[in-house]
Image (spheres, rainbow, N blue to C red):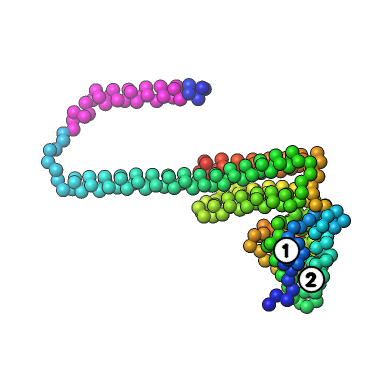
Amino acid sequence: MGKKIVWFIAFIIVSIPVNIVCRFLYNQTWLGKYTFEDKLNLVDIVTLIISSGLTIWLGIYIAKKISEQRYQKEYIINDLKSIEEETVYIQKELINTPTVDIIRLLDYTNRLHSSIDKFKKTLEIFETTCHPDNDLMVKFRTFYSHVTNISGSSLNLNNSLVVQINADCNDLILTTRKIIKEINSK
Amino acid sequence: MENFKIAIATDFNDALGGRSKSLGPYSGEAFYEEVLKNKFEEAIIAGEKLHIYLDGTKGYGSSFLDQSFGELFRKHGDKVKNNIEFHTRLFDWIVDYIKTDIWARK
């Protein structure tokens, strides 16, 4: 609501001087001073064709570039969203289960790593870089080293470990969001 | 020619356990004592590299890696870095983890 009021005030502030300038030009009858020739010459025709062609080409080129960029961004953001969804799923599963078998834990970490790897390879394909993509791997490794540090064949999720896993998962989720923000603002 | 090699999935097991052999099967400790230590020492005596194939398992826990490859590094030091060659298509990140998180921090 506040933003709308600011925009409205800005519109009024800009439109007043524009209005004054338009009135001034109208009073000077600038348009009346111009005369149009009714004959066409070759230079005008060529100029018209070239400038029209260039305008059309530029329009097509810009539209194509914009749609390509949007398409690439969507792919990258979808990969990041799947990392976040995977992390949220693992976080819920681990927090709600008192004991988790090692094979299940390895399956979780493999799946999460596979999603991160897919994201990194997508960046390579699109020749895009984003600053904190290494952060994602660092956060994943921290999570991996905590969640698979098991003495026996299953992980007993006591209170301190649940807090640790929660913090690691939240770090991963927030890192994906930071990257989404950066990709979106490019 | 690879005279000394370990394919973990076939020479040990495809479903690996945790850290200690007293607390569960196919642990890092068991892998170190039963397979890795001996093969590595044989390769060193022969002056050759030990080739380790990681693919075929369901994954590697950090405790398994620390109790096997970490323990080998704690016993033999930098010799381990120079005389072990990993082969994998699926677990590149595990190799990276061993080299940068386990071997580098000791």
Q: Which residues are magenta?
A: A7-34
Q: Residue at x 27, y 47 (%)?
A: A53
- Which residue in the protein does label 2 denote? B39
Chain at numbered mark 1: B
Residue count near mark 1 (Cα–Cα under 10 Å), binned few <14, some 14–19, many ≥20 = some
**Under tag 1, what secondary structure?**
helix
Is A17 contained in the magenta span?
yes
Is B7 contained in the magenta span?
no
**Image x and y of residue A117, in percent:** 61, 53
**Image x and y of residue A98, in percent:** 79, 41
Amino acid residing under circle 1: Ala
Residue A44 is at least partly visible in this image: yes
Q: Residue at x 57, y 47 (%)?
A: A79
**Image x and y of residue B73, in percent:** 79, 63
Q: Are marks 2 and 1 on the same chain?
A: yes
- Which residue in the protein does label 1 denote? B9
**Image x and y of residue A30, in percent:** 22, 29
Amino acid residing under circle 2: Lys
Taking the image as shown, residue A171 lies to the left or right of residue A4, namely right
Q: What secondary structure do most residues of the magenta stretch adopt?
A: helix
The quadrant of the image that shows the N terminus of chain B is bottom right
Q: Earlier in the sequence, mark 2 or mark 1?
A: 1
